[in-house]
Amino acid sequence: MTWTLFALQALNGVQFGLILFLIAAGLTLVFGVMDFINLAHGVQYMVGAYLTAAFAAWTGSFGTALLLALPSALAFGLLLEALVFRHLYDRDHLDQVLATFGIIIFLNEAVRVVWGAAPLGVPVPDILSGSIPIGGLNYPVYRLAIIAAGLGVAGLLYGIVGHTRIGMLVRAGATNAPMVSALGVNIRLLFTVVFGFGAMLAGFAGAMVAPILSVEPGMGDNVLILAFVVIVIGGIGSVRGAFLGAILVGLVDTLGRFFAPTLLRFVLDPSAASQTGRAIAPMLIYILMAATLFVKPSGLFPAKR
Amino acid sequence: MTEPLLRLEGLSKSYGALRVTDDVSLDLRPGELHAVIGPNGAGKTTLVHQISGLARSDRGRVLFAGRDVTRLSMAERVRLGLARSFQIISVLPAFTALENVAVAVQARSGSSFRFLRPARRDDALNAPALALLERFGLAHRAGVPAALLSYGEKRQLELAVALATAPSLLILDEPLAGTSHDESRGVVEILRALKGEITILLIEHDMEAVFALADRVSVLVYGKVVATGDPATIRADPQVRAAYLGEEAA
Amino acid sequence: MAAATPAIRSPTASPRDWLVPLVLFALLAAVPLLAKLGPEGFILSLMTRVVVVALAAMSLDLLIGYGGLVSFGHAAFLGIGAYAVGILSSHGIEEAGPQLAAAIGGSVLFALASGVIALRTQGVYFIMITLAFGQMLFFLATALSGYGGDDGMTLPGRSLLFDRPWLKGDAALYWVSLAVLGAAYLGLRRVTASRFGRVLRGLKENEIRMEAVGFEAFRYRLVAYALAGAVAGVAGFLLANLSGFVSPAVMSWQRSGDLIFVVVLGGLGSLHGAILGAAAFLLAEEVLSHYLEHWRLVFGPLLVLAVLFARGGLVGIGRGRGA
């Protein structure tokens, strides 16, 4: 029974990790290729969720909403890039942090103005609404669908980054950006493509979680910080690092929250164990990150040389 | 025979598959000016990084004044008296020329965990710093931010900074690179004056300067020392001529 | 040759270096008097906030402006200071002395522990790891169910000085805060000009150059990190006394972002810029939120515009024309 519980929690962890990966992939590429630290990447996720909620309410179909939300998220990302971000590529990290922080403040409020402060819900699409029994417990099909979608995107990214010309340029850019522009590649165009793609992935993550989380202002902020933890653990600029880091963070966070209080019961009395466990669990991933950086100050798979 | 001041034992360093220095062994006698020459890409700067501690060696040992310093950081080696200059100019651009030198004086005189007395008005730091600037003919530029100095002046400032750490061994990585004819003559004069006072390891492309100054010369080709000897011997060595000087002789 | 005689003694000293801070402190000292002309309690409380935020931002300026260390977790120290007050007073220790000792001690300990790891990293990794350490403390605070958890806790009253409620009056708290700010300003000014400060500034300029003359970057940065943390911890102590309430929100990452903004807005590497930045930031927030329900719609873009167009901060505005 506990093993089943463990397996289900592990599935939840993987599912959470894959969502983090969708966000972290764009973040790490944008950072690796453009040396641009984009705090506003989290709002792309929020915008993706809101667009999906809005389109779902309008069309009544999650599938249609998803199909509409993806290009909209892409367009929105490109708009932000053209309006603000492209003026920041040459600035230092401090300026980038501040300006994108300003965008977060603005968009969190804008969302509140347009859709209100109350959380929105999106119904789970009918075909994916059931649950299937795993070892005597029921597991929602929709979460399995998220896992499948996440793995699919990860495979797609792996193919693109590893085996196409643009992927080669992206990898080269993450290792040595000046060299890529010296090759005569239109680096601005490459930036825009990478940026738009990253924004769409984050939007996709937002769309996928819309039916299982509440869609509300500020929902991107905490996810953003987790995505940072992911790419720092994985090594900035590395998609492979982002994938492993994301799964690791997803598992540690989910399993930690679930099992820390239980495990502590071996050494503490129940109430103390539950309290300490709940205090320690949210800190686990940060401890993981600190430990990783203590051993490898540039993360597990540093792309830069 | 006296104990060498610096001894390199089988130093090697690779970047990926590229072996930049390969089993370099070298002895520096106290007081000599030892030049290392070699074609571009011979691994000279990497060797300087390994000796000074900026780069870790994959293999081999660095012994300084009889002590194994291979695992020490650059800062620790400097405090033992092993100073270096950089091939690419390295100064503190917003600091004045005087402050650039004074901060180096500060590094060797007492703790820098002093929080209250203004460092700028500390004559114990300024006086030796100004004396060094005078030696390099930079005293009249003492109050100028280093960023505003000319290229040659920055080179001289770098030498002054290195000397301010009171080194017993000074490693100079191409101190003449990019200087004008007059400036480079000035630097050569300074090196001639320093000779005998402290031990110098000179990396340099300017053959005229090398053969005029050096007591001994080592030739580095593809990360390996192919010959060491006094300037006349090196000039005559057929292997060296073929590998390196040959470019000029041809 | 005569004209080139080196200005050995503080070549960049100008009256301006003293004039602007002097005027700023004079204005702050006039606040309690001026406050009597308007809604006194409101003005005093707002201006105390300005002073306290300026204190925290000034300590951050030591890191960013002088040390080149962009810390994105500075609000954590505000939190440590505030929780030192909250936790101790919930156990009946309302005396300022032990509370301050806990605020400073806790901040220094946290700075040393997190700094040992964070300062091994560079650039953007440093930004993110300080952010992560800040979040770690934030979540720890939300989990402290004995001390209010998510919701925070209300303090029984302001801290006592020698068993007496000296800080009870709004004006008294303001004066104490202002005195602390003044002391911190003078202290940090000396520190940045000292041997230590020179090493810190040198490391910002060119780390390898400094190591090549014999300075170990890590030690000096760690001490600076601890010093800045201690000052921000004191700011946290004052903040808790001001609001009479302590919650994890004081150390949310947005607060850390605000602090960076305040320092940059005021002008990096000047110390008194933090005061200008805090005043401009809090007053703008106050005015905007008074007239607009969704003032953040204006505030966010203002931030972006400030970054894109107003380089050098408020301190630099007069300087550019004057020179």
Image (spheres, grey):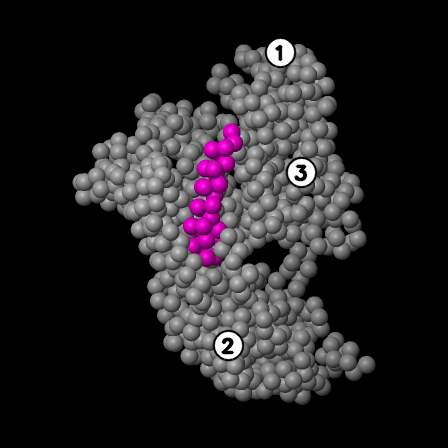
Is A109 colored magenta in this rendering?
Answer: no
Instruction: Give amino acid for label 3.
Output: Leu
Residue under numbered circle 2: B142
In which quadrant of the rendered image does the C terminus of chain C lie? bottom right
Residue A130 has which mark? 1
The chain to which mark 3 is attached is A
- Range covered by the magenta-colored residues: C266-293
Label 2 CA crowd tier, 10 Å (few <14, some 14–19, many 20+) = many
Q: Secondary structure at mark 1?
A: loop
| C-alpha distance separating marks 2 and 3 | 48 Å
Residues at circles 2 and 3 in contact by the CB criterion of under 8 Å: no
Give the percent coordinates (x, y) of residue B34: 59, 80
In the depicted structure, whether residue B4 falls above or below residue C146: below
Nearer to us of marks 1 and 2 is 2
| C-alpha distance separating marks 3 and 1 | 38 Å
Give the percent coordinates (x, y) of residue B50: 57, 66
Give the percent coordinates (x, y) of residue A203: 65, 30
